[in-house]
Amino acid sequence: MLKEPVKEAPQVRWLIRISEVFAGMEEDIFRGLDAAFIKRLGRGYSLIRIGDPARLHASAAAKFVRWNLPVHHSWPCCPRDIPGFIEKAAQALWRKFGGDHPQTVLCGPLDPDRSNRYYKTLAANLRGRTLQLFPPECGAIRDVGAQDSRVPTLFCLVGKEGLFCGLQSPAAANGFHPGGTKYIRQSAPGTISRAGAKIAEALHQLQLDRSPPPAGSHWLELGASPGGMTAELLARGYRVTAVDRAAPAKMLDNAQGLQFVLVDAATYLPRKGTVYDAILSDMSGDALASMTRVIRLSEYLRVGGLVVFTLKLPGVATYAGVNDVEAAVVATAAAAGLRVLARTHLTYNRYEFTVFFEREASN
Ligand SMILES: C[S@@+](CC[C@H](N)C(=O)[O-])C[C@H]1O[C@@H](n2cnc3c(N)ncnc32)[C@H](O)[C@@H]1O
């Protein structure tokens, strides 16, 4: 989906990030983007040339691109070996981008592995020094979620291969953070399952396109057990009707705002007059079968209501196979009045995608 016009000249190189889970499909992905691979950088990043940057948003291959950035400035070097690297890099950024008035400057490491602290610290220090040179408004954005998703940010990625920077809005880059990763602690006390991090990240990502439903909204959650996502939704002040064939974690016994229904989603029938604000589906099994269950229940979703759908890929091993499943799910949803808002591979997605839909007004 094209989120906004992409005006960069075709000769600009692009930094794209493909999640490691799809590493085996990279050649197909580059072909699908009509892109020429130049070289690998950091972990999961590739430098490419692409004839039509719109393909990063509007092609079947686009969903495999976790995050993207036009490289408007690069300094290929080994930063560890350059005396005064931060000062020289910050001055160059100010000279080159000071007149472009980015909303803020964000720097991150090309290798996000948490054991590799050097470049994470270097990125943080580079941001700190660069912001001293840019107008104070740039530094006023402390939380990345406070960015306007449609206004260009100066994103900078740094690693042992050098510094790669570009101006791009978070919506066009497909994430608020440099590289797209939002770190979410998964082992906090009270964490029921890893899926909790997935919905937390999904709701953060959603803000690129629209606001999440306000607190108090009513969610129908399909495939809820053991309840990691349920707990996240409840913690945000939502009411949740959670459906699963399997029982929830004990921790959710008597949770306020929760109604858990132990039933197959294929047969669940909401009470007459029920209106949901959002549907979340994390059901295991065939994605098209899951979408069919969502569609049956979308009759109870208000117009403009949100669907957060985990598109799982059991038994689908090829690039073409993944595209076929996604196309079938999206077409079936569209025929039922569910329009795709965004689709992405989140940090906390495994071999699956997260697709956001909105219920359209029926004719
Ligand atoms: C990956 S788990 C969900 C994890 C959960 N979202 C969490 O946050 O902990 C998938 C769940 O889908 C449920 N499921 C699959 N098909 C279902 C169906 N037709 N009706 C109800 N639940 C279903 C399974 O029982 C399983 O609990």
Image: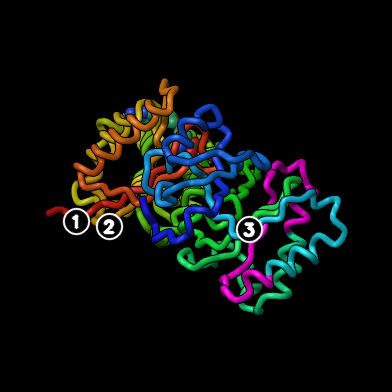
How dense is the environment of label 3, judged by Cα within 10 Å: few (below 14), some, or many (20 and up)?
many
Q: Which residues are magenta?
A: 94-123
Q: Please give left or right for residue 301 compared with residue 100 in the image.
A: left
Nearest-to-viewer mark from 3 and 1? 3
Residue 240 is one of the magenta-drawn residues: no
The residue beneath circle 3 is 165
Between disc 2 and disc 1, whose residue precedes?
2
Q: Amino acid at mark 2?
A: Gly
Q: Are marks 2 and 1 in contact (CB under 8 Å)?
A: yes
Q: Amino acid at mark 1?
A: Ala
Q: Which mark is residue 361?
A: 1
The residue beneath circle 2 is 304
Label 2 – label 1 distance at C-alpha:
7 Å
Q: Are marks 2 and 3 in contact (CB under 8 Å)?
A: no
Label 3 – label 1 distance at C-alpha:
41 Å
Between disc 2 and disc 3, whose residue precedes?
3
Q: Secondary structure at mark 3?
A: strand
Q: Which residue is drawn at the image coordinates 72% and 75% (left, top)?
A: 133
Residue 246 at least partly seen: no
Q: Amino acid at mark 3?
A: Cys
